[in-house]
Image (tube, rainbow, N blue to C red):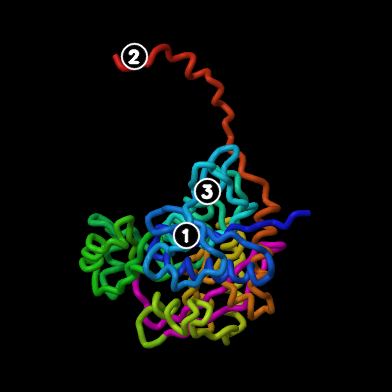
Amino acid sequence: MPMTRAGVCFGGPSPEHDISVLTGLQAVHALTDAGRDPVALYWSPVGAWHEVPADIEASAFSQGLPRSASAVELTTGPNGGFVRAERRRRPVPVDVVVNCCHGGPGEDGGLSALLDLAGLPYTGPKQHSAALCMDKLAFAGTAQAAELHTLPLWLLTEQLPRDGAIDALAQGPLIVKPRHGGSSIGIEIVADLATARALAKSSPLLRDGAVVQRYLSEVVDLNVSVRTWPQLRLSAVERPLRDDSSIYGYDQKYLTGGGGMATAPRELPASLPPQITEALRDAATAVAGLVMARSVMRIDFLWDGADDPSGLWLNEINPIPGSLSWYFWSHEGDSLVDLLDDLIAEALAAPARRFVTHGADGAALRSVGSIAAKLA
């Protein structure tokens, strides 16, 4: 039986491009070392696809497109997939895609939709799940509707928030976040609502939408990872260790220790009161069902440090987490290849998405007469 060949996608037109490269190369090198012969598929910041050698290092991407890159294209349709951008249009032999793209269209459902249209199985969330997870406003509203304990969050525009929300936000400081995005990129703490609105107008990271909520200076970050194959599993709870900055930001997550998020300082497992651990795990299980979790995700919480679970709030979810959350599962005894094998097995076991065309039988087209008559 021929070996399944995985194509690992990483990079992408996203502020999280560089971190995605690191996650993708970790996966490529782990699969290579295990004799799996993966295909490394690099998505450039301008949206072009390239195949790169499987032994490539991160430094090769620091100045732009690596010299060893060769152009490929992702085609949709009945015989879709990756093909080499040359006269013969030879297909790139990929049976399943490992999605390591953080942020932007790689994580918000755009790439999922393309892979569905191409007929390629893939890891990570399906389109609808990804879109829900990466829209902070939609995710918060969905969680509130499911009666999960969250902090109030509002859409930020020149007109919004208003009425009662204005009163709730009258006392700063406030935290402003991109409505779509992750990795703490673009998150700012501001003194008041007027400053928040000015920031939303000026920051390129907030042009696609911004949300605002009260900033709580004394809360603690708590995170847990969820896996869905062969059954739902929750990792131990992590407490990231902040430096003296006010938020657990991009630099602390990814630029500490030289190994990306996998080497960021943390307490794992976190030392927590049993009732807090229980409440967090119950909430994480509920979230996994709510968002149709798939592959591996990370769910983030905020905690006020007290024993009462009323001081534990669901914050957000990361559908394609940094390093694929392997550091959680390494603590459980799994290698990165073990994790990747599960993600790939789940992707191959899922039936291909079928697009329904019921009702598109030509009746409406036959009944309209000429288009010219419609324009008269």
| Secondary element at tag 3 | strand
Return the residue nearer the eye: 14 or 285.
14
The spot of residue 268 in percent (x, y) is 58, 83
* Residue type marked 1: Ala
Q: Amino acid at mark 2?
A: Ala
- For disc 1, the marked residue is 69
Q: For the residue carrying disc 3, how many other residues have a C-alpha within 10 Å: few (<14), some (14-19), or many (20+)?
A: some
- Residue at position x 54%, y 64% in the image: 53
Q: Which mark is residue 84?
A: 3
> Magenta stretch containing residue 60, yes or no?
no
Image location (x, y in percent) of residue 214? 34, 71
- The residue located at (47%, 14%) in the rendering is 367
Tell which tag, 2 or 1, sits nearer the viewer.
1
Residue bearing mark 2: 372
Asked if one can make out residue 141 in the rendered structure from this viewpoint, the answer is no
* Magenta extent: 213-242
Task: Kindly identify the residue that appears in the image at 48 percent across and 47 percent down.
Answer: 85
- Badge 2 element: helix
| Amino acid type, callout 3 | Arg
Q: Is residue 222 magenta?
A: yes
Question: Outermost residue, front direction?
Answer: 87
| Outermost residue toward the right in this view | 1
Whether the residues at callouts 3 and 1 have beta carbons within 8 Å, the answer is: no
Asked whether, in this view, residue 136 is left or right of residue 283, the answer is left
- Comparing labels 3 and 2, the label whose residue is closer to the camera: 3
Front residue of 203/152: it is 203
